[in-house]
Image: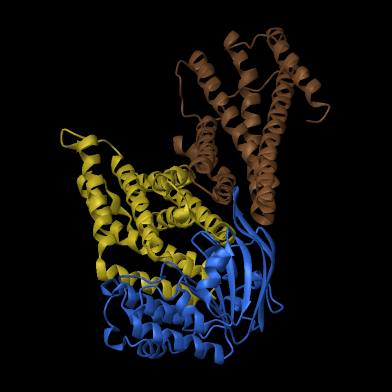
Chain colours: A brown, B blue, C yellow
């Protein structure tokens, strides 16, 4: 691991430890009160989920085009991040919705699209786990299709609820909420970056181990 | 479709692994026109994997395969010069012998596919059964149809995986004659076989494979069985 | 290329006409689905508003999934899919040939399914036949386009029977949404043509994007 890794982990941990304080100091949102604070974890999770999905899609495209295993490892790590942070998004969303609007699940365009996207990411992992040998390429194909699907999913879900969609349920943020949000965003992105680095490293070590096995076999 | 032809197939330091399992390990050899090359070895020696790579179905993990000046990604032009008889016979059981052959003949760009199919079936001695579905054929008969399918487009390179399986004496004789005729016409024939006695009069060169490696090469081999035992051991 | 596609479609039709296995089993399965849905959703002799459209598309997706699996299982016998990849035709021709076959099979099933659902669920599906055909054709094409690629991809994979729906259904969510909403809009008493047109165009866009994507990725994904 590179030298900056351990200090970065410490920084990340500190940021997360600090985040409740930062959030508590943010001003109360007028209509939703205390529960709105979940938003500071919910939105960064959603952004990281989206970013991870895009990274997976791009890495898969590069893997299909070049066959370089490095892209495949990146795609796998990104998919795992997508499933993890997607799950976080899908759990924090209803927590917020329940308190704010009285229902756990409201089939809002954004969270429904996220659910579908999350299932595609999970399907990617299922395929890699249970598809047998050669499933790396197949999963890359799936990721590519998933990425191409994002606009379609969003549009169809949005207009599914009503052909005349209401304006977004997420209210505009007053400026003073900016800093806590940025802080949490930074923490989450740092976490994603570190986790991905770790995961890719594990995959690299596995590949190196396989290569050693193979070369040993040769000398025999 | 660009016209592709070649005088030799060269395999250089080719390896193929599946995860941690090395199926083919650093094989090097060359096969030229008018030659029958035999791949001999026990199960798991890497014969089928090597044939799959030669057929451009599988990519080597390392090393190069060349068909004259062309490499395996040369596309449809190259594929039209390669004929493959696989372990699984590549035939549709619900179709008749004639339909199977005409279908593939059409896909290989042969203009008069039906006539070619009939001619091939005559050569295989199956003309009387041409309108029977392949599902009703015995294993040996299916093998003969499959062989015709592999050769219907007069390929430059013929790759045959265990072509003698299930054949009776008459058919075996016919196949031997067929392979020799192929050699005369300048094709490159690479076949994998267990049947050492048959291979004996037939091969111009024999590669003995074990655990994915070539352990011995023999030109104009004789006394294959004894050589096989001593080389492969066990 | 087109010749290869035609040869493959003709071959599949010949095989199918001989055995009729796919046509009968797909049709029967579709009817069973409709029956199950009827028992679940029809209350006191009447179906809830708009349920017919949903039943139609759910049945298409379930029956389609089965048909896809079966079609490629046939190519797995004797490894004929590998033989098709060996021929000099451009490889996407194999994809197009199989796609055409599946679409034909599903179209046949839908020809019977649509009037049946309209009848059993009291849905005025046939009120605007041209739009209905448009929605059903583009929706089926979208589903089949993705399904054919995935089914071909999975031919040599382990657990392929269960993996096909796992991969297919999330990706075809836009198809089912557009299909159902479009069909519902057709069956509605106060018919708004802009609504139907919106869903139709969405399906057309989906078809164009995903057939193109499938043609690009077929060869890299199918070769080792």
User: Residue C81 falls in which quadrant of the image?
Assistant: bottom left
Percent from the top left, x then y, of residue C204?
49, 56
The answer to which quarter of the image holds residue B165 is: bottom left
Image height of B99 relative to A12, above or below: below
| Residue drawn at 65 percent across, 30 percent down | A47
- The percent position of residue A114, horizontal first and vertical second, equals 54, 33
> Is residue C215 rendered to the left or right of residue C42?
right
> Is residue B56 toward the left or the right of residue B147 in the image?
right
Q: Which residue is more in the foreground, C78 or C184? A: C78
**Going by the picture, which residue comes out furthest to the left?**
C45
Outermost residue to the right:
A3
Residue A108 lies, in percent from the top left, at 50, 29
**Direction from residue C32 to residue B100 in the image, left or right:** right
Q: Position of residue B58 (x, y in %)?
A: 58, 63
Question: Quick check: B122 left or right of A47?
Answer: left
Task: Classify residue A212 by image quadrant.
Answer: top right
Q: Is residue B57 visible?
A: no
**Residue B24 in sight in this render:** yes
Q: Is residue B129 above or below residue C5?
A: below
In the image, residue A64 sits, relative to residue B52, either above or below, namely above
């Amino acid at each position: 691991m590179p030298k900056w890794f351990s200090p970065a982990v410490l920084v990340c941990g500190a940021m997360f430890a600090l985040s409740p304080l930062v959030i508590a100091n943010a001003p109360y949102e007028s209509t939703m009160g205390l529960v709105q604070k979940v938003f500071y974890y919910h939105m960064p999770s959603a952004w990281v989920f989206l970013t991870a999905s895009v990274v997976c899609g791009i890495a898969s495209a590069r893997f299909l085009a070049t066959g370089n295993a490095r892209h495949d490892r990146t795609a796998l790590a990104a998919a795992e991040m997508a499933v993890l942070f997607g799950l976080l998004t899908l759990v924090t969303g209803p927590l917020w919705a329940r308190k704010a609007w009285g229902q756990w699940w409201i089939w809002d365009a954004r969270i429904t699209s996220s659910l579908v996207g999350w299932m595609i990411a999970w399907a990617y992992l299922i395929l890699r786990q249970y598809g047998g040998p050669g499933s790396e390429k197949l999963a890359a194909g799936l990721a590519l299709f998933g990425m191409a699907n994002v606009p379609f999913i969003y549009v169809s879900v949005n207009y599914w609820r009503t052909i005349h969609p209401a304006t977004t349920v997420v209210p505009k943020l007053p400026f003073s909420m900016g800093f806590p949000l940025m802080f949490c965003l930074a923490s989450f992105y740092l976490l994603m970056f570190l986790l991905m680095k770790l995961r890719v490293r594990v995959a690299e070590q596995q590949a190196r181990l396989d290569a050693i096995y193979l070369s040993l076999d040769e000398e025999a | 479709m660009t016209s592709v032809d070649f005088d030799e197939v060269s395999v250089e330091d080719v390896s193929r692994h599946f995860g941690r399992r090395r199926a083919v390990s650093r094989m090097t050899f060359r096969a030229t026109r008018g030659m029958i090359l035999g791949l001999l070895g026990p199960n798991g020696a890497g014969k089928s994997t090597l044939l799959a790579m030669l057929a451009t179905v599988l990519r080597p993990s390392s090393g190069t395969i060349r068909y004259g000046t062309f490499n395996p990604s040369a596309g449809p032009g190259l594929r039209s010069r390669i004929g493959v008889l696989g372990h699984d016979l590549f035939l549709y059981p619900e179709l008749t012998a004639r339909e199977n052959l005409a279908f593939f003949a059409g896909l290989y760009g042969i203009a008069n596919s039906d006539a070619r199919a009939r001619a091939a079936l005559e050569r295989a001695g199956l003309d009387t059964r041409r309108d029977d579905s392949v599902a009703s054929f015995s294993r040996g008969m299916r093998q003969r149809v499959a062989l015709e399918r592999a050769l219907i487009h007069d390929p430059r390179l013929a790759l045959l995986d265990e072509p003698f399986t299930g054949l009776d004496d008459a058919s075996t004789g016919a196949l031997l004659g067929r392979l020799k005729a192929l050699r005369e016409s300048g094709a490159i024939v690479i076949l994998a076989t267990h049947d050492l006695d048959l291979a004996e009069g037939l091969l111009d060169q024999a590669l003995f494979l074990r655990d994915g490696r070539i352990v011995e090469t023999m030109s104009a081999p004789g006394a294959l069985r004894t050589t096989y035992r001593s080389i492969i051991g066990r | 290329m087109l010749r290869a596609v035609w040869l493959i479609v003709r071959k599949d039709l010949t095989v199918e006409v001989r055995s009729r296995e796919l046509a009968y089993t797909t049709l029967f399965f579709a009817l069973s689905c409709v029956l199950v849905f009827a028992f679940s959703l029809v209350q006191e002799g009447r179906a809830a508003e708009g349920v017919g459209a949903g039943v139609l598309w759910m049945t298409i997706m379930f029956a389609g999934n089965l048909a896809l699996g079966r079609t490629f299982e046939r190519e797995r016998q004797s490894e004929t899919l590998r033989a098709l990849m060996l021929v000099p035709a451009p490889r996407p021709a194999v994809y197009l040939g199989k796609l055409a076959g599946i679409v034909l099979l599903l179209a046949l099933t839908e020809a019977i399914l649509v009037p049946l659902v309209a009848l059993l669920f009291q849905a005025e599906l046939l009120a605007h036949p041209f739009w209905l055909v448009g929605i059903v054709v583009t929706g089926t094409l979208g589903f089949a386009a993705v399904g054919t690629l995935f089914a071909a991809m999975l031919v040599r994979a382990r657990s392929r029977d269960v993996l096909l729906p796992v991969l297919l259904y999330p990706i075809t969510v836009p198809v089912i949404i557009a299909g159902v909403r479009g069909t519902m809009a057709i069956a509605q008493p106060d018919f708004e043509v802009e609504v139907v047109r919106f869903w139709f165009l969405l399906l057309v866009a989906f078809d164009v994007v995903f057939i193109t994507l499938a043609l690009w990725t077929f060869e890299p994904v199918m070769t080792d």
